[in-house]
Amino acid sequence: MRRIISVLLENEAGALSRVVGLFAQRNYNIETLTVAPTEDPTLSRLTLTTVGDDRKIEQITKHLNKLIEVIKVVDLSEGEHVERELMLVKVKAVGAQRAEVKRTADIFRAQVVDVTGSAYTVQVTGSSDKLDAFIRAIGELSILEVVRSGVSGLSRGEKVVSL
Amino acid sequence: MNQPNLKKETIVERLSGGDMLIRALQDEGVDFIFGYPGGAALHIYDAIFKQQRVQHILVRHEQAATHMADGYARATGRPGVALVTSGPGATNAITGIATAFMDSIPMIVISGQVANDLIGTDSFQETDMVGISRPVVKHSFMVKSAAEIPSVVKKAFYIATTGRPGPVVIDVPKDTTDPSVLFDYVYPETVKMRSYSPATRGHSGQIRKAVDLLLAAKRPVVYAGGGVIQGEACEVLTELTRFLDFPITNTLMGLGCYPATDPLFLGMLGMHGTFEANMAMHHSDLILAVGARFDDRVTNDPEKFCPGARVIHIDVDPASISKIIEAEVPIVGPAEPVLRDMLALLRERLAAAPDLLDRAAHQQWREQIAGWRRQHGLDHHQLERAVPGVVIKPQAVVQCLYQVTDGEAYVTSDVGQHQMFAAQYYHFDAPRRWINSGGLGTMGFGLPSAMGVKLALPDAVVACVTGEGSIQMNIQELSTCAQYGLAVKVVNLNNQALGMVKQWQDMQYGGRHSHSTYQDSLPDFLRLVEAYGHVGIRVDEVGDLEPAMREAFSEKLKDRLVFLDVAVDPDEHVYPMAIKGGSMCDMFLSRTEQS
């Protein structure tokens, strides 16, 4: 099962490599990974998606918690949560395709953020599923390049992950 | 991370980074550093030269420095400290760091690093020590500026010694130890880190649940590991086990945490555990696991593990609980306070209702176990029954060592058959006496760890049980022993082969001894140790064994390193041996018998 694990950690050199190293070392898989400092510059927030059964996820969270620089670990997928991913897609856009790409982008509430005579760069945000759906809708043949941010998320409601 | 609280001093010393590093070690109460100098560490070495309080022991190979620090730590419970230079010095230390990591041994490894302006340029003797050691450390620090040296040292010791202990690396770029730049030296009194707070007590609700299970058990067994020793919980564990009259088994790492000569003790369990320990585990209805991690060398196939047993698991590391075997009652916390709370509650419950324990069932259970022991228990009288002219059994050598040292020696070992024989036949009645690389299985550990023990406890009798394979992995340390007069006794079970490898090849590879023998290339160990200035004694005849052993441990040779080279049966196997893929009760009992 796909899980979204959110980690609050010290914003220090080497902290990220310990997290990534842990996954490699213990044969866990990272599907997506995103990390940046928080409103408190001494802290980083890292979100990763992985796949595993309950037992594996329990081990992952326990081992993450063991890392000295890790302050908090939550499995967002355990409860109600909001998740977003951002994708930039460079799409072939010549002739009739131009209108078609624009229409598809509108349906997905995506924005065209760069335009040339032969290509559009489209920005899509949403759940990973929505981003996958956009790629299918555009059709792989017309896609020139894709970059995705990886998933970020927060739990719904009052619950927060903080110091 | 939070800055540790700084104590305000009226007179503040001005010290260089290198001096601060050594001064901080003094303030941590460090008495020995095991190390080897080199370019990037020279400022630190100069700081060592200028003081007396921390004694430096010059090794012959950095791996040995880490094992010495490790042996020191295992024997005393205090963290061992190693110092190496950058590049090859650092990489040579990795095996020793990994050894300590697998067995949760508190250790500080300080590595010199090239100067900050050279890092990343592939400069001479540069290697990414923090990166290369990352999977085998509890934590590591790269010193960014000299000013942070005191607080980094403070944090490193705190992390290494608290919670589940482990090795911590401090990588020190050369410019941060520059003798010409001085700083105010203040050693932090306390340390608090917002991201690190190891458990200090067990959850009382969980302890109550555990007590309910303990009281209800008909066929209980206590399964205790190295965490009991690391957690200084041997006394309370012994008290609790005796209070309940429960049979107890120890892991390889836990030997000594419960007196081995006590009637409730079943010996070691696992791959080469005793028949009765493994049978008791398999047929138990309750396992009280304390500071043990259900290692694959214990459980055999986890799917077939102890089918009727409910499991209580006490461990300071939550990640060890329910990793291999699901615990019905997990208790996260240090063994000592958890067991103490548990014992108090048991006393209270039993004082109110003495019939809560099914003592009749327990009696029957102990008799059943005694039956297993009579059936296939280890033969502890092989020495007495040895026949002159017949090749010496390695087990008999360990028995002889046990008798001659009155069971009081600190015994270190290397890895292989001799290690298992030592674990099976030397009865450890006190903790920290049995020192071996259980988790990583590091050959070459025995001699240097014995040296660390001898330095820590100069009056103790220290024996290294080894084999002619393992000893050659760090034999250069005989020179270090000569330099510092380290009178350890080396008992070499010389079977002229990599015995354990050969045993597996006998059992699983049709007797094809692929590269497990040396084809007459072994050195003459007597001449070799004599070349290093030590005493060598060779034993070929069983009749000579005890006199030779007595001589090695005699008052006359008290201050000498004695190397006892004993020719033992090259065809001996270690039994019992777990049958791969089976349950704990599936064992080979000899070449021809299975359980």
Image (cartoon, grey):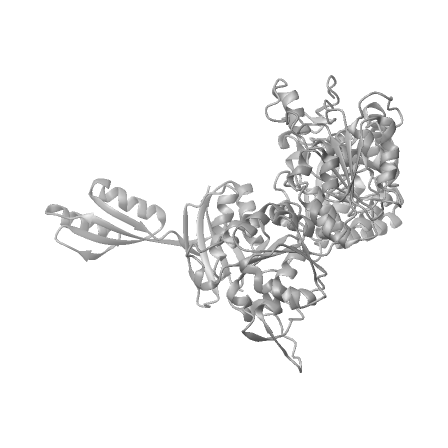
Left or right, B477 with respect to A39, comes to: right
Rendering coords of residue B307 (x, y %)? 69, 30
Left or right, A68 with respect to A137, comes to: right
Q: Quadrant of residue B464?
A: top right
Of the 4 image quadrants, the one containing the C terminus of chain B is top right
Residue B30 in sight here: yes
Q: Quadrant of residue B306?
A: top right
Q: Residue at x 35, y 46 (%)?
A: A129
In the image, farthest residue toward the bottom: B10
Is B559 placed above or below B174 here?
A: above
In the image, farthest residue toward the left: A95
Rendering coords of residue B204 (x, y %)? 72, 54
Q: Residue at x 46, y 68 (%)?
A: A40
Rendering coords of residue A99 (x, y %)? 14, 50
Is B590 placed above or below B528 here?
A: above
Rendering coords of residue B150 (x, y %)? 61, 68
Of the 4 image quadrants, the one containing the N terminus of chain B is bottom right
Residue A61 in sight here: no
Q: Residue at x 76, y 32 (%)?
A: B421
Q: Nearer the viewer, residue B560 or A40?
A: B560
Is B191 placed above or below B438 here?
A: below
- Report how many numbered discs are placed on residues in the image: 0
Q: Nearer the viewer, residue B287 or B493?
A: B493
Q: Nearer the viewer, residue B536 or A74?
A: B536
